[in-house]
Image (tube, rainbow, N blue to C red):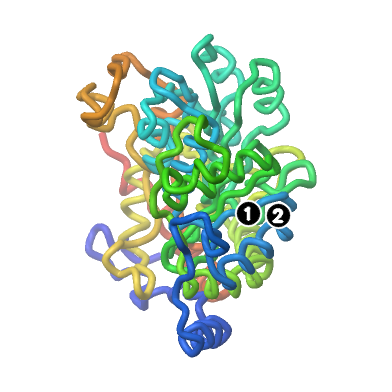
């Protein structure tokens, strides 16, 4: 093969990969209908029929509840808002500990802080890359109130073991399902595996409405609290008999009718889009099995994977090559996606910086309204997370539904090109 692009050769492909664009005629038609009706939102922050939103919002919630098998679905304006609502709904108070993931979007760890809760970081499983049940059990104290699990990269958390721990210790399980809509565990949908689940409808998720989220639960009381926190709880708690409940200071986390109309049409596409992701993953993995020491993270037993990202574990000793050197060479061979050119080639080393290393934890001050000091997070170490971040994890998005067989073949050829010339990348 030709000279590596990293060393001045021609890239294997220059043409941008096709945009992952799932918005089409159905969404345009739905939005037009809302515009013609003229009601762009129908929420009132008062004890009124419109406290629960308009027709599009309530229709989306009913469809979502039916799809994922939950008794309740409550729309919000983001997954972040949903996690704030969840923490408030389960009654997190100052000093309560919430076990959280050290390797995810920051809100997966910071959500308890809004109510003065204390995030307690635990490590990941080395094989499936979600929270490790054994590490969770070691972290539980008399102050622990909840476990905030993350379905990382599209992998459902180990619900059987973690839910059993929660039952044993009287804890809530809040499931951040931003990355795993449509994934399943033991025949049940991710997002509906714990006491409360939260989905994301952000623009780069499986389905989206620009910004948005949905909270699901089977618990009537938790559902009502989420609805209250979403929409100015303080204005209606007295009339709804919730005046003694904790955390009944509300926000405006409401979804618009336009967002709900788009999200409804997107929900109808989820199964097809997910099937395409899975098919693309199967093809990529079948064609990329020529690199010893490069392992694809599989779905856990009893589970199906939603593949928000394709997670790969790199063994430097077995490959004889540093992960970063291999990935940087791959990046030089491939293009970005249309509409996301500024983000560069969608393959990366590690994921996010371990969350306990963020300034909000390392500076120990936290938000000014804290009623207690945070612990010394400088002592936190999650070995699996740090190894993944520093030397072993590769993740990419080349399996998105817009990718054709020809596009996938270019990715495969780029892997083969770099691997065939790996001796040129080895440093002394």
* Separation of marks 1 and 2 at Cα, in angstroms: 9 Å
Give whichever of 128, 170 is nearer the camera: 170
Give whichever of 394, 94 is nearer the camera: 94
The residue tagged with tag 1: helix, strand or loop? Answer: strand
Judged left or right of residue 129, residue 271 is right
The residue tagged with tag 2: helix, strand or loop? Answer: helix
Looking at the picture, how far across and down is residue 403, in whole percent? 52, 72
State the residue position of label 2: 68
Say whether marks 1 and 2 touch (CB < 8 Å).
Answer: yes
Which numbered disc flags the more N-terminal residue, 1 or 2? Answer: 2
Judged left or right of residue 160, residue 3 is left
Within the image, what quadrant is residue 104 found in? Answer: top left
> Where's the N terminus, which quadrant?
bottom left
Q: Which mark is residue 73?
A: 1
- Considering every residue shown, the one lying at the far top of the view is 142
Q: Is residue 295 visible?
A: no
- Asked if residue 174 is positioned above or below residue 154 in the image, the reply reads above
Write the residue at 32% across / 15% down: 375
- Asked if residue 55 is positioned above or below residue 395 in the image, the reply reads below
Give whichever of 326, 138 is nearer the camera: 138
- Considering every residue shown, the one lying at the far front of the view is 239
Looking at the picture, how far across and down is residue 337, in whole percent? 38, 70
């Amino acid at each position: 093969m030709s000279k590596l692009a990293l060393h001045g050769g021609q890239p294997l492909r220059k043409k941008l990969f096709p945009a992952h664009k799932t918005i089409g005629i159905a969404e345009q038609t739905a939005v037009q209908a809302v515009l013609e009706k003229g009601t762009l939102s129908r929420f009132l922050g008062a004890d009124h029929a419109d406290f629960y939103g308009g027709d599009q919002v309530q229709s989306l919630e009913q469809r979502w509840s039916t799809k994922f098998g939950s008794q309740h679905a409550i729309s919000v304006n983001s997954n972040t808002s949903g996690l704030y609502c969840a923490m408030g709904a389960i009654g997190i108070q100052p000093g309560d500990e919430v076990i959280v993931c050290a390797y995810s979007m920051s809100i997966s760890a910071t959500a308890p802080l809004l109510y003065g809760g204390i995030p307690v970081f635990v490590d990941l499983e080395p094989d499936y890359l979600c929270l490790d049940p054994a590490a969770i059990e070691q972290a539980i104290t008399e102050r622990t109130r909840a476990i905030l699990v993350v379905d990382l990269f599209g992998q459902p958390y180990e619900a059987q073991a973690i839910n059993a721990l929660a039952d044993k210790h009287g804890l809530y399980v809040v499931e951040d399902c931003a990355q795993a809509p449509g994934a399943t565990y033991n025949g049940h949908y991710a997002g509906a595996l714990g006491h409360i689940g939260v989905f994301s409808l952000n623009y780069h998720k499986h389905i989206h409405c620009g910004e948005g989220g949905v909270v699901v639960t089977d618990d009537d009381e938790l559902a009502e609290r989420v609805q209250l926190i979403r929409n100015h709880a303080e204005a209606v708690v007295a009339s709804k008999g919730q005046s003694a409940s904790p955390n009944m200071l509300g926000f405006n986390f409401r979804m618009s009718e336009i967002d709900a109309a788009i999200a409804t049409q997107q929900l109808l596409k989820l199964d097809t889009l997910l099937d395409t992701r899975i098919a693309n993953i199967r093809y990529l993995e079948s064609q990329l099995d020529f690199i010893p020491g490069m392992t694809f993270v599989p779905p856990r037993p009893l589970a199906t994977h939603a593949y928000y990202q394709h997670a790969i574990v790199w063994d430097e000793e077995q490959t004889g090559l540093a992960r970063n050197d291999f990935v940087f060479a791959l990046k030089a061979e491939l293009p970005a996606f249309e509409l996301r050119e500024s983000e560069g080639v969608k393959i990366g080393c590690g994921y996010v910086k371990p969350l306990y290393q963020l300034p909000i934890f390392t500076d120990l001050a936290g938000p000014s309204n804290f009623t207690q000091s945070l612990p010394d997070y400088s002592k936190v170490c999650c070995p699996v997370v740090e190894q993944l971040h520093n030397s072993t994890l590769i993740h990419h998005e080349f399996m998105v539904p817009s990718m054709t067989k020809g596009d996938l073949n270019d990715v495969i050829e780029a892997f083969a090109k770099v691997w065939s010339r790996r001796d040129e990348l080895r440093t002394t």
